[in-house]
Image (cartoon, helix red, strand yellow):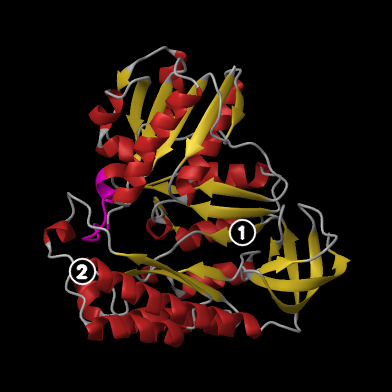
Amino acid sequence: MRACVFTLGCKLNEVESASLMSGLKALGYETTEELGPADLYLLNTCAVTREAEKKSRQAVARMRKYNPDAPVIVCGCAAEHHAEDFRKREGVLLVTGAQGKGRLLDLLREGKEGVFVEPEVGFSELPAPQKTRTRAYLRIQDGCNRFCSYCLIPYLRGRSRSRKKEAIVTEALASSAKELVLTGVDISDYHDGDCDLAGLLHLLKGVPARIRLGSVEESAVTDELLTAMKEGSFMPHFHLSLQSGSDAVLRSMNRRYTRAEYLAACRQIYKAFPDAAITTDIIVGFPGESETDFEDSLSIVKEAGFSRVHVFPFSPREGTAAFKKPDLPAALKHERVQRLMAAAREAEEAYLARFVGRESDVLFESDGGYTPNYLRVYAEGAEEGSLWRVKLLEREKDGLKAQLLHPLA
């Protein structure tokens, strides 16, 4: 029996899908991530934009074309948002939403059919993903309490809840991966009793693997967190969510910091890790964004010294506070996206140029590898899962070309 687990959306969805694949294997299924002929389909959906929801609906139709007799199970944020709509689609056997993934395998084993969308109170454990030689993702948190005015996630994934610290440490120590990434919807809000994110990092400092943080908020950048990172094998790469460089837009978005506070967090990071990479997300064309507001987003790209910026045009989501606000013209949003992407490319080139001629450690994957500060590196002769000392030579593709110097233990 062959099961196809097809995933749309965020990194956390990918992590959860990997866990579900592990659980399906335990039930006797051969699994694949590639959409094609199968005896069972599991679709993990996304609802962050209207386009993501559209792709989720289209995926069901594609599955039906490959095998109209195979049952389809739908989970994830789009399923949470439109559970009954998915259930009515031909071939869909089971809908569990974003908060029911922990029950999904039990429901399948018991032969249940229908909609099982219920809020979760605690953190939902999933089967451990398959072991990997290179990089593994470690779920530490789920849900969100921030209620940004443009975002549906708190309504779909539920309130913030954290995994027990003992379970996290146990899984980290048992992993054979050379790099672990701590992931969740809002890992900045991690709390298990009196243990916050900085406290968790202290507990993980004995783990032999390299460890990276998933996306964090400005509020997570504290002396305690940075000290914990310096004491362990934590990588100096921070995905520090921004969304806008304008204080007026940040207030309208219900973001909980100012431009000045965000830049102060960046300076704090650079003081602790001078070569740190700070990446971010910026939404362009939020309702009410003036040219001055947009210029503030343009200027912060250079001022913060970002190594990479993910740029998104605002996508109104029904059910959010921002949905009620007048949207900007699509042409204006497109023009601003292009201008911001140009500034982002300039910042990325400036950051990469700093490291040409220098040496670094690189963990190689199937196509290239990454330095501690998340520079993409390409070198001939490096096997997947190998760790090398390299010399960074010149720009190549989306990163740098390197010369292998010697392998690292």
Point out the image quarter for the N terminus. Answer: top right
Which percent across, then down, holds residue 156?
28, 43
At x 68%, y 82%, the residue is: 355
Identify which residue is drawn at 49% across, 50% down: 11
Magenta stretch: includes residue 390: no
Quadrant assignment for the C terminus: bottom right
Q: Which residues are magenta?
A: 146-155
| Callout 2: SS | loop
What amino acid is labelled 2 in the image? Pro
- Closer to the chain start, of discs 1 and 2, is 1
Three-letter residue code for mark 1: Ile
For this rendering, which residue is in front, 120 or 246? 246
Q: Which mark is residue 108?
A: none
Classify residue 113 by image quadrant. top left
Determine if residue 2 is in view: yes
Q: Nearer the viewer, residue 182 or 108?
A: 108
* Location of mark 2 (residue): 329
Q: Is residue 154 magenta?
A: yes
Q: Is residue 176 above or below residue 387?
A: above
